Amino acid sequence: MKVLLIEDHKPLARALKQGLEEEGYAVDLAADGEEGDFKANTASYDVIILDLMLPKIDGLTLLQKWRKNGLQTHVLILTAKGTLEDRVRGLDLGADDYLTKPFEVDELLARVRALVRRGHQVKDPVIRIYDLEIDTAARTVKRAGKWIHLTPREYALLEFLAFHCGKVVTRPMIWEHLYDEEDENTSNVVDVYIRYLRNKIDKGFDPPLILTRWGEGYMLRGPDTPEPDSGIRSGREVPAGS
């Protein structure tokens, strides 16, 4: 999942970026309203974390402009302690949630997770696909009752596939949502992580859940996904990156 963090206080921005990245999020930073506006309109994000007191363009002005122009990305606003008027106005202008400073990073992470689920129309924090269980709150995974350890990047990829269960996601879509603007990896790394996931999620289990669609991308098997045919192949039949 990809987050845009618009915060001009550098120590706070660094702390939040680190906390988000440790949870597996790709994070782009903006230090003022102009930079934040540019990034919000030129890249796709799952959540925007928006401080209200920003240089150049303030947060409420940005939020009003985005909603007027049809930007649908969920926005979590950060407000100074005691500014009830700003919180109310922010929600009225289209913010999806808010946090009052000071706050705990764990609470911010929980609110971001909730907004990500809301963005994909998922209410239950536990996603169940066949015998696979993904707890998006605890960020844990089980298959057939067996706990599966995933790295933050592996988890982020599996969660992204789960949010699009039964639908093909392309390599560029995966890349855009898992890597930030400073990452120097190439899109080929997506195939590497698909292979890692298959070794953990599918190896020794049946049916295989991570499928490849020739020339298009990957998908997580849904309840209505047809058995592998000429268009869809499981990891057992087609190596990742084919």
Image (cartoon, helix red, strand yellow):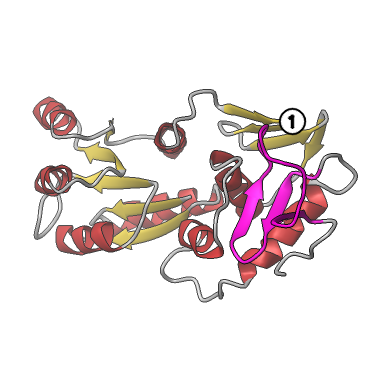
Can you tell which quarter of the image residue 201 is in?
Answer: top right
Q: Which residue lies furthest to the front in this view?
A: 230
Residue 168, compared with residue 99, is above or below; it is below
Crowd band around label 1 with a 10 angstrom C-alpha radius: few (<14), some (14–19), many (20+): some
Which image quarter holds the C terminus?
A: bottom right
Residue 30, compared with residue 46, is above or below; it is below
Image location of residue 55, percent across then percent down = 12, 58
Image location of residue 197, percent across then percent down = 73, 53
Answer with left or right where residue 144 lies relative to residue 159. right
Q: Is residue 182 visible?
A: yes
Q: Main secondary structure of the magenta part?
A: loop
Which amino acid lies under the numbered mark 1 shown in the image of this protein?
Tyr
Residue at image coords 87%, 41%: 205
Q: How many marks?
A: 1
Residue at image coords 84%, 59%: 237
Residue beneath disc 1: 130
Image location of residue 78, percent across then percent down = 25, 39
Q: What element carries label 1?
A: loop
Residue at image coords 61%, 41%: 166
Residue 93, compared with residue 196, is above or below; it is above
Can you tell which quarter of the image residue 226 is in?
Answer: top right
Give the residues drawn in magenta, as a range: 208-235
Magenta stretch encompasses residue 213 = yes
Q: Residue furthest top?
A: 124
Q: Can residue 31 be seen in this view?
A: no
Answer with left or right where residue 61 lies relative to residue 177. left
